[in-house]
Image: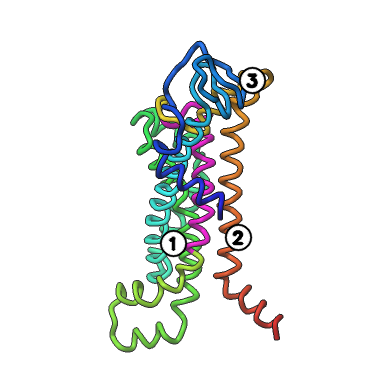
Amino acid sequence: MVVLVGVLLCALLPERLAPADPNEQQLLARFTPPVTRTGDGTLAALGTDQLGRDILSRVIHGARTSVLIGMSAALLAGTVGTSLGLTAGIRGGMSDHLIMRLADMQFAFPFILLAITVIGVLGPSIRNIILVVGLSNWATYARVVRAETLAVRERTYVDAARSLGLSRPRILWRHILPNVSASLIVVATFGVAGAILTEAGLSFLGLGVPLAIPSWGGMLAEGRQFVDTRYWLALFPGAALFVTVMAINLLGDALRDALDPYLVARRAVGQL
């Protein structure tokens, strides 16, 4: 949790926390090792890169890129997937069959081909990366929400709501969605971690955000050619990516343990 708070602070306040402009080039200070002062006396805590840019500042600003894309892509995927999953689960029949076949197609479609197509046509930008990552992950949410909806819709309180004449949208929003939200929160948490990794992978391949925007994946791509002699160029953005994704996954595990009714019931039985 401490790690996540730190990453969120970096994402929200990079201008205040970063010691320098992440894009400021100082060619006379290029490849300065970590914890070393540059020619003008400035301390480069994590060193500088091949253009003399401060790596600490770029890692801090890269947190904003990763968090923005990760959360926005998860929100987009969750919105689309939840809507389709609820529709498939509550309506059944042809709607269910059609939506699940679309989900199967999405799982089978090569993600990298979608990324190349969208980025090639629309150009690299944060908005387009969010679009690519979000629309490539909606099927996971749809499957989970559909399965939960199929179970919840057979419960007695849903039957009672139907017998009272409540409309289908009202039943969905008041009785079904709140009861599938626990699983949805867990999936969304892992979805954020996956989206951050996906963005880093796209940036590493040159399909991510523009070069002017600091990105952990972009920093890894720039540092790979110097990894044997200038290790810090790739080490610190890679460490930031690893620690952030690990912290989010641990949060997802904790939420699953806390919200999964089966695990909660097992713990309750064990305490008797």
Pick the front one: 6 or 233: 6
> Does the magenta-highlighted stretch encompass residue 195?
yes
61 vs 93: above or below: above
Amino acid type assigned to the residue bearing label 1 in the image: His
Disc 2 crowd, CA 10 A, few/some/many (<14, 14-19, 20+): some
Disc 3 crowd, CA 10 A, few/some/many (<14, 14-19, 20+): some
Helix, strand or loop at disc 2?
A: helix
> Does the magenta-highlighted stretch encompass residue 48?
no
Label pair 1/2, CB-CB below 8 angstroms? no
Amino acid type assigned to the residue bearing label 2 in the image: Asp
Dominant secondary-structure state across the stretch colored magenta:
helix
Q: Position of residue 116 (x, y in %)?
A: 44, 31
Amino acid type assigned to the residue bearing label 3 in the image: Arg
* Residue, disc 1: 97
247 vs 174: above or below: above
Q: Position of residue 110 (x, y in %)?
A: 51, 39
The C terminus - image quarter: bottom right
Q: Position of residue 2 (x, y in %)?
A: 56, 53
Of the two numbered discs 1 and 2 on the same chain, state the one appearing first in sequence: 1
Label pair 1/3, CB-CB below 8 angstroms? no
Pick the front one: 191 or 33: 33
- Distance from the alpha carbon under mark 1 to that under mark 3: 54 Å
Disc 1 crowd, CA 10 A, few/some/many (<14, 14-19, 20+): few
| For discs 3 and 2, the disc positioned in front in the rendered view | 3
Location of residue 252 by image quarter: bottom right
* Residue, disc 2: 253
Pick the front one: 123 or 255: 255
* Image: magenta residue range: 184-209
* Residue, disc 3: 230
